[in-house]
Amino acid sequence: MSTPTRDFLVPHLMTLPPHRVMIRMIEARLFAETAPDMPEPILDVGSGDGTFAEIAFPGKTIYGIDPIKSDTHEAYGRGVYRGLSVADGKDLPFADNTFAAAFSNCVLEHVLPLKETLSETYRTLKPGATFVASVVGNRFPEQLLGTKILNALGFDGMAYGRWFNKVSVHRNTLSRADWSARFEEAGFEVVSCRPYFSDRALELFDLSHYLGAPSLITRKLLGRWILAAPFTLNWLWEPILRPLYNAPAPTDSPYYFFILRKPESTK
């Protein structure tokens, strides 16, 4: 695994609102570390609007699937993918042993049914293929700033955490052990699991959702998060986010980065 020399903070500042920037900049670096070791073709499970693949996997032969038609249309316009399909993870439109590698960036926590989606991903990968996935963990709702503030005031802070999970459409927020068990149940070997994004970073992540609310209007009206990249006020966030970007990995966190492998022998 190589260490990328590219800066993933600035490209995201020019594309996304701050709350997305602070998590995607770290994820892009983690995924980019694996990119040189990922043979092609590659499957993107949950390709979304294509922003992440465009920044983290430039020049790679990638096929994306996503159930949301509008996002897939936007991804098509980026010209990043060799092929795109509007498809559900539980029924992938590919033959067995098609892909040499796969990745999924903060998608599996949203997916139902999870078991079938992991099984389908496994089926379409060649023996020995690597599957890299970032996921939300069980500590996410309890480490949010809103949860901590309400707890400090004597209220049920987890009510806020449950609400945040609901609006984020988080259906699977599992512990590291439970995520590992789900991957292994599908047939994957867990090569490694790395926590990323500290508890303190998550507090800022929570707060920045509200500070970045105007970007929702831009997204809704114009189809993009940033009105005009060179003139965006996101530049003001760069000195705030840079220390988070350069921070060492925490010992545990609300997010996990898994490197998985389909065994060479699948008998």
Image: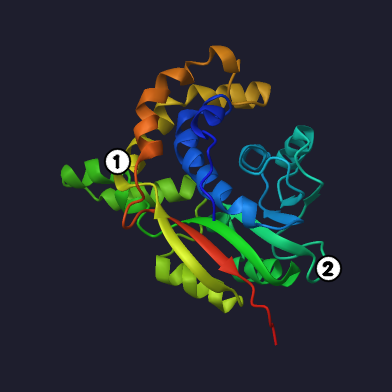
Q: Residue at x 72, y 55 (%)?
A: 42
Q: Is residue 226 left or right of residue 43?
A: left
- Residue 56 image position (x, y, % from top left): 61, 42
- Residue 31 image position (x, y, % from top left): 56, 50
- Residue 230 image position (x, y, % from top left): 57, 14
Label 1 residue SS:
helix
Residue sitting nearer the eye, 154 or 34: 34
Q: In the picture, residue 229 is in which quadrant?
A: top right
Give the number of the disc on residue 95.
Answer: 2
Whether residue 73 is visible: yes
Q: Is residue 226 above or below residue 110?
A: above
Label 2 residue SS:
loop
Residue that carries the numbered disc 1 in the rendered image = 145
Q: Is residue 180 above or below residue 202?
A: below
> Within 10 Å of the Cα at label 1, are there few (<14), some (14-19), or many (20+) other Cα atoms?
many
Q: Is residue 186 left or right of residue 170?
A: right
Query: Dividing the image into 4 quarters, which one contains the C terminus?
Result: bottom right
Q: Residue at x 41, y 71 (%)?
A: 177
> Within 10 Å of the Cα at label 2, are there few (<14), some (14-19), or many (20+) other Cα atoms?
few
Q: Amino acid at mark 2?
A: Ala
Residue sitting nearer the eye, 35 or 112: 35
The CA distance from mark 2 to mark 1 is 45 Å
Do the residues bearing badges 2 and 1 touch, measured as CB atoms within 8 Å? no
Whether residue 106 is visible: no
Q: In the picture, residue 222 is in which quadrant?
A: top right
Label 2 or label 1, whichever lies nearer to me, is: 2
Q: In the picture, residue 59 is in which quadrant?
A: top right
Instruction: Identify the colour scheme used.
Output: rainbow
